[in-house]
Amino acid sequence: MLRVGIVGAGRIGAVRARVAAAHPECQVVAVSDLDGARAAALAATHGAAVTADWSALVADPDVDVVVVATTHDALAPVSLAALRHGKHVLCEKPMGRHADEARELAVAAAAAGTCLKAGYNHRYHPAVQAVQRACREGVLGPLLTVRGRYGHGGRPGYEREWRADPARGGGGELLDQGAHLIDLALWLLGDFAAVTGFVDTLFWNMEVEDNAFGLFRTEAGQVASVQVSWTQWRNLFSLEVHGRDGYAVASGLGGSYGPETAVVGRRPPGGGVPTEECRSFAAEDRSWELEWADMLEAMATGGAPLADGWQAVRTLEWVGRLYRAAAEDRVVTRSEAPARGYCRR
Ligand SMILES: NC(=O)c1ccc[n+]([C@@H]2O[C@H](COP(=O)([O-])OP(=O)(O)OC[C@H]3O[C@@H](n4cnc5c(N)ncnc54)[C@H](O)[C@@H]3O)[C@@H](O)[C@H]2O)c1
């Protein structure tokens, strides 16, 4: 049995704990949170112990894997300590407030020889996987463009939550949901060469951005446009890819983001209406289970899971370059250093 410790017993910590506990080879043994009542409630659900101080949990010889699902300011320090104690770590996205924090984790995991995975669960959504498969198998021909849109409308008091606080969040919506889209665009296109865009606070009374618009270009000239928003009053997730011969679209994530569907279309060589293959997926979100299974396999084989530590570093580098491009009103290239998290124009 693999013994799992959870640091951060909020919304996602609870999801991760449920998934780990449901796995036949895993047992949740310890939970830690700054909020003792939260930790106690989650620990009680799984028959685990409460560890008041996370540094004791990550040092515990009876813990094999640590899941870190805290606010962004604690992701890196907790994960780093766990890696230095030789633990495998599943660290929630974005794996730190900026690329420098994330890089320290990737280096520590390499030194420890343990598995470090970033919690980019969207890679395991079936519609996203269908899009990636169509790209990988060449159904769309050479890829030309990617367009990602993601957002929600917050809730009353959102401006007082930790995501609105630059010290705890590290940034706003670009770092939060934007990191998912940038991770997916990098997965589909490979690395980018340059980025430009706008990062703005348009509605909420908060210091960090509530909207971000990024345009990324690869060396080969492919373009990814990414728009994320906390003024998307009706929740939205959409990922589109266009290639020479066709297109693929993933929409919805289930729940409040609407039913999850995938469409793969082929352009008739002679023009006219494309032929489409449409699939819809059950409302239940199984991405978390699939992601956990990928993590366990990587631990067992010594291979790399999807969205490993180094890939999370690269994603945060592009988040940081977009912050910089927006603050300095220009195009920022791969040779330039990213901003260390959110920065104002
Ligand atoms: N993969 C996804 O789709 C997805 C979705 C939402 C959130 N997330 C990520 O999950 C993480 C947590 O988000 P959430 O929505 O669960 O937030 P949340 O506010 O519900 O929970 C965060 C918890 O971390 C605790 N915490 C903060 N600092 C701590 C510390 N030093 N030690 C112990 N506990 C600490 C807080 O007390 C809180 O209970 C973030 O990194 C977020 O970006 C991922």
Image (cartoon, rainbow, N blue to C red):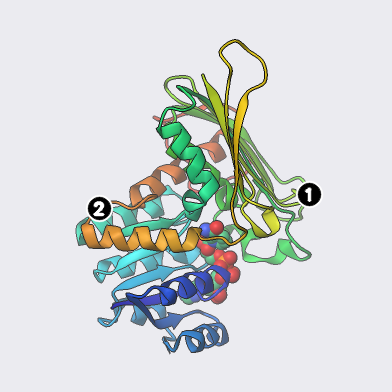
Q: At which x and y percent is residue 132?
A: 46, 39
Callout 1 amino acid: Phe
Q: Label 1's element?
A: loop
Residue corresponding to mark 2: 303
**Outermost top residue:** 270
The numbered mark, 1 or 2, whose residue comes first in the sequence reads: 1
Q: Label 2's element?
A: loop
Q: Nearer the viewer, mark 1 or mark 2?
A: 2
Whether residue 320 can be seen here: no
Please indicate whether residue 87 sits to the left or right of residue 29 in the image: left
Residue corresponding to mark 1: 203
Q: Quadrant of residue 271?
A: top right
Residue that appears at 45% across and 80% down: 32
Q: At which x and y percent is residue 55?
A: 36, 78
Residue that appears at 48% across and 86% down: 43
Residue that appears at 50% across and 89% down: 44
Locate ligand 1 by image quadrant.
Answer: bottom right
Q: At which x and y percent is residue 41?
A: 55, 86
Q: Ligand 1 within 8 A of label 1's CB? A: no
Please indicate whether residue 263 sits to the left or right of residue 193 in the image: right
Tags 1 and 2 in contact by the CB under 8 Å rule? no
Whether residue 90 is situated above or below residue 183 in the rendered picture: below
Whether residue 130 can be seen here: yes
Q: Residues within 10 Å of mark 1 (few under 14, many from 20)?
A: few
Please indicate whether residue 57 sits to the left or right of residue 94 in the image: left
Q: Quadrant of residue 168?
A: bottom right
Locate the N terminus and report the quarter of the image it occupies.
bottom left
Callout 2 amino acid: Gly
Locate the C terminus and report the quarter of the image it occupies.
top right
